[in-house]
């Protein structure tokens, strides 16, 4: 049995998520081939071989210059041959290419796959509902199409590297598959007026601020960290702060690298707005407040004492 | 992580407004080792307090709820979390305007500043309200909003600073241990807590918690829908949370309450949506909070239209969107009152549930006082958890009654209004016969009691205008002139009354006399076969009850009391028994039939060979007699002021005795007589006081005019205070007044129904020595006198016969005159009839 | 004038802990109610904007149970003009290919020039209905775009790509799947809600029996215990906090 992995490249080689997908494919106890569309960076084929890929199908041609999901799917289809399974990383392009293939072949596809149990009919386990639930799903068709969830497995070189051959492909692409194409790329970031949704650090404050005058220290901390200030619903309801600063179900949803909620217990309304934060440092008097138990780090105590102390320490170290 | 203390004097379960104010007041009253736990986090654990709209309209028709609300407002102000906004209750219909006039009666009676105003008055303060939609409004300037979460935090902190309280959030109760009928321990996921007292103050979860201890808190979680619409420019341009008066759109069962730039629109108009406490989501399962459930938009749609009609410019403003919408859970009870006090099932286990934000701090204080000293300054009788009969604690009953009452939250509820749901649950043995006689049943404590009989309609012709027919629909709703005809027939001939609903219990055992002597005011050490009528006092000398007792043997007393508070009386007796005594509830063993009127002796004489002459069976005695093959306990007593007996008949023989009495009564023209006579007309002609009307914990024997020349030597509950009261003299005096002129400005004769304020003749206010304003405790026809009578507590210097005052009814004054300034009956003042 | 069809899906509005139905085939939504994904809310907003800008009509469509009318009315309340319900008893038995086929039949019948969908459904996360639909209709498709606009019969769609904001241009008729974040979906106004309440729903039966979704069962992942690292108590913890900020590189 052989399986095919759709591998994406970055400037320097094969994308980490694609290597994860290769590792996942090795777990299927099958011969692993890969397909790379467009430019094949120097050393990328070797990298794939190191990760156990037997044959790298390299699709080139004018049609693959600018990205088009439909066109790229044509390349993957050309490389698939008799593959029992075609896998892609769960990235926007991986998913899109795989979905085009699924439509074209009229076969089932599973997204967000985290594991697989080989059987007569392939059964996979995948994340649904944002990862809060798992689904076991049957994939009776050949090829079975799997998009692998990020971090489902770790990328690692194969115990026994493959010899690795590159097979060049120049598949025909129908003009219709080139209609939806990127016409321009602007390397600009979206801007929002408060900076709340784009800030890499957000300092949050709730009712614990005590009143409209209670936001001095938290504002200063946000400023010291080059971040933004966000507040809970009650704060805006009481008119202490403007509505655009509200984080939560009815306010902004943030995903900063660091969120520092101060005196916010973590009601679910609020949690809905901040759950995507990469790291949470909670400051709260209650060690069992949901915000604390769900946080990465916590300091227990009164925000009115702790935040000024942090500000002072920051200023001191900066001299 | 946190653990709970292993022991506590009292565990308060719940950190909503009720639990928080309770721990504060317990600490203030000297309690220590208070442990408060909640399943949720602080300061908002996720109960109903967390999503409350937090506004307070003080005026309610219930004095108890109004007093609790006024006390709560005072406490919120002290805590600095009250913002006065004023409030309008607007009327879209003439019927509602009349209800608002009636509301003015309550405002005056409870001493709250309020005013009936024109639509112009409303739009002067709320320019975006469409004045063409309304006819007028009830304006209460003292209406305001509170921060109930902040109040709770402050109260908790006060108790903590006093060193009295440990609060542990995020603790789930998993069980409760009861030993020998007393609460012993609360089991939690963070450890067990041994405690003398446990208070369940967990709102919608209370039934579930109570069940863990084998007790019942009969409330149901129910949905109240609320949306928040904004931003509304008219609101946004003013600073702060609220600067416009709150509007209750009474006829659409909705309210509009400003919250910053948003307008919150809440509704009591949708279908009743009830939950089982077990079905409330956990904090983790809930999307918002356990009591903020997914909004069901379809249910709210009709209210959107009505709200938009009332405030088209604000709610229809460009950019104003429905930003937040919930089905919020709150607690409903079968009779609408809170559920407070020690559970009858488990000693030491208390309930403080079904309380709204507007009453929370007041309830906290009152329950803390009750737990501390056995009574509270504000009488909680209507909220006493002990009031429920077993059938009233069933899920079916709770669901039926709350479904029916939900849409009455803003409804126009007649004071005599009857329930339609879950009826026919307790039937007297003579029910078939009373039905055949066309009985119109009113319900009390589940019993179906004939209030009057259609079969007596023939009497209307006989008595003509003496029945005083009522012209106005409101005055005659839930009323019939037949009541007055039955009254006259009883006074002239005889009446037979179905009194099955009485609660009856026996106090037995060697300690029976000591028990009764300790509990009641009157001398209980009377010969066997004697009757006792007596007040029952609380330790503060306020009324707990009034009831009659028969001494059946040296160690056997039979207590007969009203159905409405029978269960509370039963608990009071059980709680205060002396050693070696027991209380046995025999309510379901006996039916009671009253036979009264000048012909009563003749009628009974046809059925018995026993000596029932005045000498052979004197007034205020009781003994068994034989009616053919039926042995009944006869008691020569009367609540209607006539010669006659109450007959206590084994339940299974009740139907037969009912029929025998009617057969024997036929030659004399005896008729069945309903509770309309027994409870009101007969009673008020005799000036008899009734518990729950004239008598309550805030009134004294002296004020009620019921003091006897001597006080027994034996100690009894409330004796010390009673002696002080006798010394000090009354601060108000219960009087009977006659209405001198019934003609309204509209030319109709109007008849007061109770609750109306008594004013000076020219409409000025009166205030008694308790700071209370006089109001009508009972109103009723006195057909034998051709009068409409009112009872009311007046200031002592106004309490003299002949004093000319006025009663305010639907915002009109009617002249009244004090006819009795003590308990002297206006009919047969010497009680010659009863003693004949 | 561009008529836009926007496709939404009624899904459980899960927030915290999820409870499964006893048969393991679905989510117990008693406590949470139903909603549509944030992607679809944005798609609805875009549909309304495109229709308004071009003088066309915005039609909302769902395949679901009769109760999904609730979600259709929510979309009508924020500006959609018409609503189509493909009413099915067991929506769970419809896989992405089945759904695409049913939508394609409606589009073939109605002729909407632009079809918008969410990037992926909030519950099943299949990522493929839009593309399958485009194949069935023989239309071009763009995926994961945050904004769309129609100028002179050309769809201009923008979304985040690997190297920045990518712009697509494609001729109508076309299909686009929308990722949240490009527009702010509006809440309904009172008038919108009242209009939605009265709007007729074009209810249709599915064209054919579903092939199935492949679902065997749902299961809950094992619970994650709290792994919070308590840095300290009170102001004394300030130094530890700043150490952390420095380690994370946020204390410049």
Image (spheres, rainbow, N blue to C red):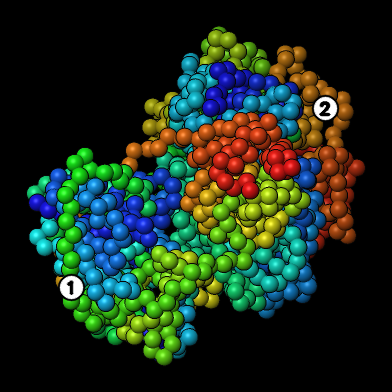
Check the residue under mark 1 and report the chain it is in: A
- The CA distance from mark 2 to mark 1 is 107 Å
Q: Quadrant of the C terminus of chain B?
A: top right
From the top left corner, tell me how far across and down residue C29 is, in percent: 37, 52
Q: Residues within 10 Å of mark 2 (few under 14, many from 20)?
A: some
Residue at disc 1, secondary structure: loop
The residue at 74%/74% (across/down) is B127
In the image, taking residue A40 as reference, residue B475 lies left or right, namely: right
Q: Which mark is residue C154?
A: none
Q: Which residue is labeled 2 in the image? A: B725
| Mark 2: secondary structure | helix
Q: Picture quarter containing residue A75? A: bottom left
Q: Residue at x 17, y 47 (%)?
A: A162
At horizontal 43% and vertical 63% (from top left) the residue drawn is C38
The answer as to whether the residues below labels 2 and 1 share one chain is no
Mark 1: give few (<14), some (14-19) or many (20+) Cα within 10 Å.
Answer: some
Q: Is residue B265 above or below residue B7?
A: below
Q: Residue at x 46, y 56 (%)?
A: B294
Please state if A100 lies on the left or on the right of B675 as rendered: left
Numbered disc total:
2
> Residue B416, can we see it?
no
Q: Which residue is mark 1?
A: A171
The percent position of residue A273, horizontal first and vertical second, equals: 52, 54
Residues A269 and B624: in front is A269
In the displayed structure, B268 sits above or below B24; it is below
Q: Position of residue B282 (x, y in %)?
A: 45, 42
- Which quarter of the figure has residue A77? bottom left
Viewer-proximal residue, B585 or B664?
B585
Q: Nearer the viewer, mark 2 or mark 1?
A: 1
Residue A157 seen in the figure? yes
In the figure, B670 relative to B695: above or below? below
């Amino acid at each position: 049995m052989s399986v095919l992995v759709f591998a994406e490249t970055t400037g320097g080689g094969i994308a980490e998520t694609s290597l994860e997908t290769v590792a996942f494919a090795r777990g299927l106890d099958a011969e692993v081939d890969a397909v790379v569309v467009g430019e094949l960076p120097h050393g990328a084929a070797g990298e794939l071989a190191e990760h156990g890929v037997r044959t790298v199908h390299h699709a080139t041609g004018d049609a693959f210059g600018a990205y088009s999901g439909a066109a790229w799917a044509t390349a993957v289809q050309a490389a698939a041959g008799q593959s029992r399974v075609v896998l892609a990383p769960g990235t926007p392009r991986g998913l899109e290419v795989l979905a085009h293939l699924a439509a074209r072949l009229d076969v089932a596809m599973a997204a967000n796959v985290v594991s697989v149990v080989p059987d007569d009919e392939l059964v996979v386990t995948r994340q649904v509902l944002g990862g809060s639930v798992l689904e076991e799903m049957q994939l009776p068709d050949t090829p079975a199409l799997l998009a692998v969830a990020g971090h489902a497995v770790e990328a690692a070189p194969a115990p026994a590297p493959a010899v690795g051959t590159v097979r060049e492909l120049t598949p025909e692409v129908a003009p219709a598959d080139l209609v939806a194409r990127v016409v321009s790329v602007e390397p600009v970031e979206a801007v929002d007026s408060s900076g709340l949704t784009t800030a890499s650090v957000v300092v949050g404050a709730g009712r614990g601020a005590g009143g409209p005058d209670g936001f001095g220290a938290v504002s200063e901390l946000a400023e010291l960290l080059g971040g933004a200030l966000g507040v809970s619903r009650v704060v805006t309801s009481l008119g202490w702060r403007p509505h655009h600063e509200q984080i939560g179900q009815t306010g902004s949803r943030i995903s900063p690298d660091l969120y520092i909620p101060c005196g916010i217990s973590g009601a679910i309304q609020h949690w809905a707005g901040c759950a995507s934060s990469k790291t949470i440092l909670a400051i709260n008097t209650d060690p069992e407040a949901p915000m604390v138990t769900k946080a990465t780090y916590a300091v227990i105590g009164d925000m009115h004492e702790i935040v000024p102390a942090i500000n002072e320490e920051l200023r001191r170290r900066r001299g | 992580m946190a653990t709970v203390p292993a022991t506590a004097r009292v565990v308060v379960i719940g950190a909503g407004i009720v639990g928080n104010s309770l721990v504060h007041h317990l600490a203030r009253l000297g309690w220590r080792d208070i442990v408060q736990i909640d399943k949720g986090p602080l300061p908002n654990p996720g109960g109903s307090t967390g999503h409350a709209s937090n506004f307070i309209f003080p005026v309610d028709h219930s004095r108890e709820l109004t007093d609790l609300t006024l006390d709560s407002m005072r406490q919120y102000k002290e805590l600095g979390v009250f913002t006065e906004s004023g409030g309008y209750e607007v009327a879209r219909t003439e019927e509602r305007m009349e209800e608002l006039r009636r509301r003015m009666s309550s405002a005056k009676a409870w001493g709250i500043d309020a005013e009936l105003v024109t639509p112009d008055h409303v739009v002067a303060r709320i320019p975006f309200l469409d004045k063409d939609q309304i006819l007028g409004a009830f304006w209460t300037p003292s209406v305001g909003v509170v921060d109930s979460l902040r109040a709770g935090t402050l109260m908790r902190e006060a108790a903590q600073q006093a060193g009295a309280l440990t609060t542990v959030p995020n603790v789930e109760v998993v069980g409760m241990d009861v030993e020998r009928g007393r609460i012993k321990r609360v089991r939690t996921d963070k450890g067990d807590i041994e405690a003398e007292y446990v208070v369940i103050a967990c709102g919608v979860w209370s039934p579930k918690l109570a069940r863990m201890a084998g007790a019942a808190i009969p409330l149901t979680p129910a949905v109240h829908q609320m949306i928040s619409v904004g931003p509304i420019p008219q609101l946004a341009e003013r600073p702060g949370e609220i600067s416009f008066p709150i509007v209750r759109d009474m006829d659409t069962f909705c309210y509009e309450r400003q919250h910053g730039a948003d307008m919150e629109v809440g509704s009591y108009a949708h279908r009743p949506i009830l939950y089982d406490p077990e079905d409330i989501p956990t904090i983790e399962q809930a999307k918002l909070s356990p009591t903020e459930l997914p909004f069901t938009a379809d249910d709210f749609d009709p209210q959107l239209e009505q709200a938009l009609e009332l405030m088209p410019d604000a709610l229809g403003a460009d950019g104003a969107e429905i930003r937040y919408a919930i089905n919020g859970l709150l607690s409903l009870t079968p009779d609408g009152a809170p559920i407070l006090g020690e559970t009858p099932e488990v000693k030491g286990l208390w309930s403080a549930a079904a309380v709204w934000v507007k009453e929370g701090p007041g309830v906290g204080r009152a329950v803390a006082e009750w737990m501390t000293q056995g009574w509270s300054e504000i009488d909680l009788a209507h909220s006493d958890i002990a009031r429920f009969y077993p059938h009233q604690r069933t899920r079916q009953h709770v669901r039926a009654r709350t479904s029916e009452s939900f849409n009455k939250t803003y409804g126009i509820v007649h004071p005599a209004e009857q329930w339609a749901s879950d009826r026919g649950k307790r039937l007297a043995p003579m029910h078939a016969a009373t039905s055949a006689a066309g009985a119109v049943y009113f319900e009390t404590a589940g019993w179906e009691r004939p209030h009057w009989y259609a079969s007596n309609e023939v009497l209307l012709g006989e008595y003509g205008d003496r029945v005083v027919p009522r012209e106005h629909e409101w005055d005659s709703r839930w009323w019939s002139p037949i009541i007055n005809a039955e009254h006259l027939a009883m006074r002239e001939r005889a009446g037979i009354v179905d009194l099955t609903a009485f609660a009856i219990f026996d106090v037995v055992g060697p300690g029976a006399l000591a028990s009764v002597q300790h509990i009641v005011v009157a001398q209980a050490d009377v010969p066997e076969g004697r009757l006792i009528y007596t007040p029952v006092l609380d330790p503060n000398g306020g009324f707990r009850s009034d009831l009659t007792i028969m001494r059946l043997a040296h160690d056997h007393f039979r207590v007969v009391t009203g159905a409405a508070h029978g269960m509370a009386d039963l608990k009071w007796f059980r709680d205060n028994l002396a050693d070696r005594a027991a209380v046995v509830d025999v309510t379901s063993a006996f039916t009671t039939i009253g036979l009264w009127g000048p012909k009563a002796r003749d009628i009974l004489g046809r059925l018995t060979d026993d000596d029932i002459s005045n000498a052979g069976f004197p007034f205020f005695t009781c003994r068994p007699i034989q009616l053919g093959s039926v042995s009944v306990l006869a008691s020569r007593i009367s609540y209607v002021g006539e010669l006659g007996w109450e007959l206590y008949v084994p339940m299974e023989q009740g139907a037969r005795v009912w029929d025998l009495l009617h057969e024997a009564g036929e030659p004399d023209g005896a008729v069945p007589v309903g509770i309309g006579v027994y409870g009101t007309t007969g009673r008020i002609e005799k000036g008899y006081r009734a518990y729950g009307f004239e008598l309550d914990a805030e009134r004294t024997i002296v004020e009620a005019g019921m003091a006897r020349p001597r006080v027994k030597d034996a100690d009894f509950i409330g004796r010390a205070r009673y002696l002080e009261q006798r010394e000090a003299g009354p601060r108000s005096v219960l009087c009977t007044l006659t209405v001198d002129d019934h003609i309204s400005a509209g030319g109709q004769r109007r008849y007061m129904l109770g609750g109306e304020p008594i004013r000076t003749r020219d409409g000025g206010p009166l205030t008694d020595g308790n700071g209370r304003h006089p109001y009508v405790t009972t109103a009723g026809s006195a057909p034998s006198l051709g009068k409409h009578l009112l009872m009311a507590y007046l200031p002592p210097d106004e309490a003299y016969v002949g004093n000319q005052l006025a009663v305010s009814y639907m915002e009109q004054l009617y002249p009244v005159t004090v006819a009795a300034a003590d308990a002297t009956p206006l009919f047969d003042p010497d009680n010659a009839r009863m003693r004949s | 004038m561009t008529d836009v069809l926007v496709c939404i899906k009624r899904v459980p509005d899960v927030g915290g802990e999820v409870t499964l139905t006893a048969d393991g085939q679905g989510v117990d939504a008693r406590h949470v109610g139903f909603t549509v994904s944030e992607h679809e809310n944005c798609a609805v907003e875009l549909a309304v904007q495109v229709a308004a800008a071009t003088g066309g009509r915005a039609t909302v469509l769902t395949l679901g149970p009769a109760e999904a009318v609730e979600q259709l009315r929510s979309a009508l309340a924020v500006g959609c003009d018409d609503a189509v319900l493909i009413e099915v008893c067991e929506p769970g038995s419809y896989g992405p290919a089945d759904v695409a086929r049913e939508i394609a039949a409606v589009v073939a019948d109605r002729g909407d020039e632009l079809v918008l969908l969410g990037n992926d459904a909030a519950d099943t996360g299949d990522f493929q209905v839009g593309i399958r639909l485009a194949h069935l209709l023989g239309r071009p498709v763009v995926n994961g775009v945050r904004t769309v606009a129609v100028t002179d019969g050309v769809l201009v769609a923008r979304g985040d790509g690997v190297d920045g904001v990518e712009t697509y241009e494609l001729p109508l008729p076309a299909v686009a799947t929308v990722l949240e974040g490009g527009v702010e979906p509006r809440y309904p106004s009172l008038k919108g809600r009242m209009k939605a309440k009265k709007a007729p729903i074009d209810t249709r039966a599915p064209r054919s029996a579903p092939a199935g979704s492949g679902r065997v069962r749902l299961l809950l992942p094992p619970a994650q215990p709290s792994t919070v690292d308590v840095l300290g108590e009170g102001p004394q913890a300030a130094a530890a906090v700043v150490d952390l900020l420095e380690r994370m590189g946020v204390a410049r």
